[in-house]
Image: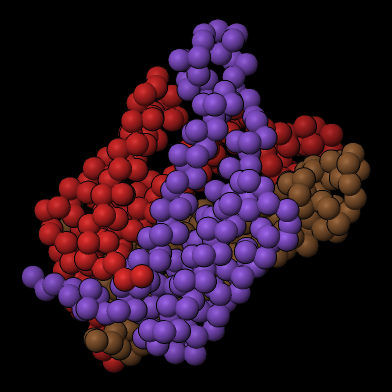
Chain colours: A purple, B red, C brown
């Protein structure tokens, strides 16, 4: 059996794996944050989730929305919409053999932006903090794309 | 032209490809399930989708929500939120050269959990069946992440 | 340090990277389209986003939905639901060493379908233009999956 040792020996791949893992974990933590707000605000989407809080009519009343839950959900969805392209384009970019220093710069700026974005969304901080952190991450993804296309474009 | 033969010769990669394909297909089937519920419950999001059921005011009334449709949509979104990190972290983990037996264990438990999760959500089964199947899949993803970071961490 | 030069020398990988980048960029552009509709229709999800349009009660009134914004959001979510499986299955398929001509055919049909789907959703064009463009992209993804499983199946 062949072992794929070339990846763990490659610094760009290792850097991508590390920063991709950080933003994916950050995204996964939104699920726990949602659960926390659902339990403390007593606002659920499914009737079967309310059993420990009551039965019958009192349970049905807990199937409702809450502004805090909706806010976390929007932040989670925004993560999906931005971290999926970062992962896809970033992986292809990492495999296209970029300079380590340039790759690290892209990965680090994106990661910091998404962490700031989360705090700006959940606290919430006044605009344009959320808008700016979103936009810089967006531009970083396009910059990786541009570098990727310079190496691999094949229509 | 170089051929990337090393991947099809690598058992961990083949195992990852197989189980990732299963959970991605399971996620794609949620789209068909949504269409089925939209057509049988006559509940659509877009006016242009209602043409075969009527025109004018009677068509507009079909642009509405339905609890069954919403439930499938939530299950589909939960898949996206969990299968995307599994795919991302799992792929990087598979490329980092883990033991085959350990990798298979992670992939299999995650896949089984997501299938149970879907049935628990759609039937629906009483809690904590859905919560538990979600949580075990979540922990499996973190376990792959831990093993990945042991091999590749590079900040 | 080992360089991962085999990928930029591989035509199937380069083709996948190019078409995956096109559909991911198309998906990212939905975020800008959403912002455009939010600003022109004055319909926001967060109170802090309305500051440039007023304060107090007049700002609170702008935290609302709008059919045009909802339509772009649904199109964006449909992209996520379809482009994520395309990226995942397509990447594994590209790494499994398919014929270049066959791979290019899959990538090109999928990409064209998603672009037609977006216009069909946003204009909107009468059905079945949106339904058909969605369905062909869906079948293409399953066709890649079938070819992938022929090379790598390992349960």
Front in this rendered view, residue C131 or C44? C44
Question: Does residue A114 sit above or below C56 in this rendering?
Answer: below
Outermost residue on the left side: it is A1
> In the picture provided, is A56 more to the left or to the right than C154?
right
On the question of residue B144 being in view, the answer is yes
Where residue A54 sits: x, y (%)?
51, 10
Q: Nearer the viewer, residue B53 or B74?
A: B74
Q: Which residue occupies 31% across, 49% down?
A: B141
Q: Going by the image, does A25 lie left or right of A133?
A: left
Q: Classify residue A95 as left or right of residue A129.
A: left
Near-viewer residue (B18 or A30): A30
State the image coordinates of residue B71 (x, y, percent, origin top left): 53, 32
Question: Residue at the location (8% across, 70% down)?
Answer: A1
Q: Position of residue B100 (x, y in %)?
A: 13, 58
Q: In the figure, residue B52 lies in which quadrant?
A: top right
Quadrant containing the N terminus of chain C in the rendered view: bottom left
Q: Position of residue C94 (x, y in %)?
A: 34, 74
Q: Residue at x 40, y 19 (%)?
A: B126
């Amino acid at each position: 059996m062949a072992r794929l040792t070339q990846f763990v020996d490659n610094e760009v791949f290792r850097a991508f794996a590390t920063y991709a893992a950080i933003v994916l974990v950050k995204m996964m933590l939104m699920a726990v944050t949602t659960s926390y707000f659902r339990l403390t605000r007593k606002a659920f989407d499914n009737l079967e989730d309310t059993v420990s809080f009551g039965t019958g009519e009192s349970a049905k009343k807990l199937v409702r929305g809450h502004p805090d839950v909706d806010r976390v959900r929007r932040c989670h969805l925004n993560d999906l919409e931005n971290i999926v392209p970062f992962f896809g384009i970033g992986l292809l970019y990492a495999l296209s053999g970029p300079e380590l220093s340039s790759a690290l710069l892209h990965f680090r700026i994106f990661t910091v932006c998404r962490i700031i974005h989360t705090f700006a969304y959940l606290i919430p901080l006044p605009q344009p903090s959320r808008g700016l952190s979103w936009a810089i991450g967006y531009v970083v993804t396009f910059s990786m794309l541009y570098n990727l296309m310079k190496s691999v474009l094949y229509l």
